Amino acid sequence: MSGKFVFIAGILVSCVVGAFALQCFQCGMYNDGVGSITPCLNETLMKLIECPKKDHKFCIKYISEGSTVKDCVPKCSERENWHSMTYCCNEDGCNSAQTLGTQPFVMCFIVIASVIISAITMAH
């Protein structure tokens, strides 16, 4: 029984911790006000990183003429021009190569619902 408790407590803690800090894939640097970018040179080494500043509320993926930047930004406006695209999102890991990201609260809900259903069926 204590093993189940530790497992459930671990799941709940990971759900709560994930809700506080935005994590984005970061590679290169985006400077919206300046209009310049430092492109990502090696996307295979890219990692999910907690945004360094509290005011960074968005993940961004900026693509321009073959160069890509993935970063954390305080504000973001989606744009599509003839030579560049800016994608904005505000969920952990949402600026990856994949177009659809799994929301952390959905994963937590599924795990918690599974544990509750399992406990109910074991009680009967």
Image: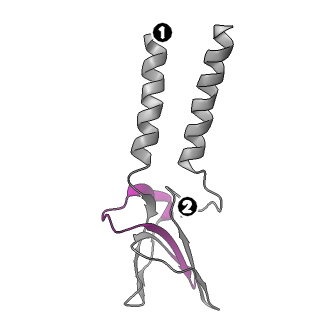
Residue found 45% across the figure and 72% down from its top:
40
Q: What element carries label 2?
A: loop
Indicate whether residue 107 is drawn in magenta: no
Question: Dot 2 surroundings within 10 Å: few (below 14), some, or many (20 or more)?
Answer: many
Q: Is residue 44 above or below residue 112?
A: below
The residue to which callout 1 is attached is 1
Residue found 46% across the figure and 66% down from its top:
42
Residue type, label 2: Ser
The residue to which callout 2 is attached is 96
The reply to whether dot 2 and dot 1 touch (C-beta < 8 Å) is no
Residue found 45% across the figure and 33% down from its top:
12
Residue 23 or residue 67, whichever sits in front: 23
Residue found 45% across the figure and 60% down from its top:
24
Residue type, label 1: Met
* In the displayed structure image, the side of residue 79 where residue 73 appears, left or right: left
Q: Earlier in the sequence, mark 2 or mark 1?
A: 1
Percent coordinates x, y for residue 25 in the rendering: 46, 61
Q: How many labels, in total?
A: 2
Percent coordinates x, y for residue 64 in the rendering: 55, 84
Q: What element carries label 1?
A: loop
* In the displayed structure image, the side of residue 27 where residue 102 appears, left or right: right
**Magenta-drawn segment:** 43-68
Q: Distance between the residues labelled 2 and 1?
A: 39 Å
Percent coordinates x, y for residue 5 in the rendering: 45, 18
Q: How is the image coloured?
A: one colour
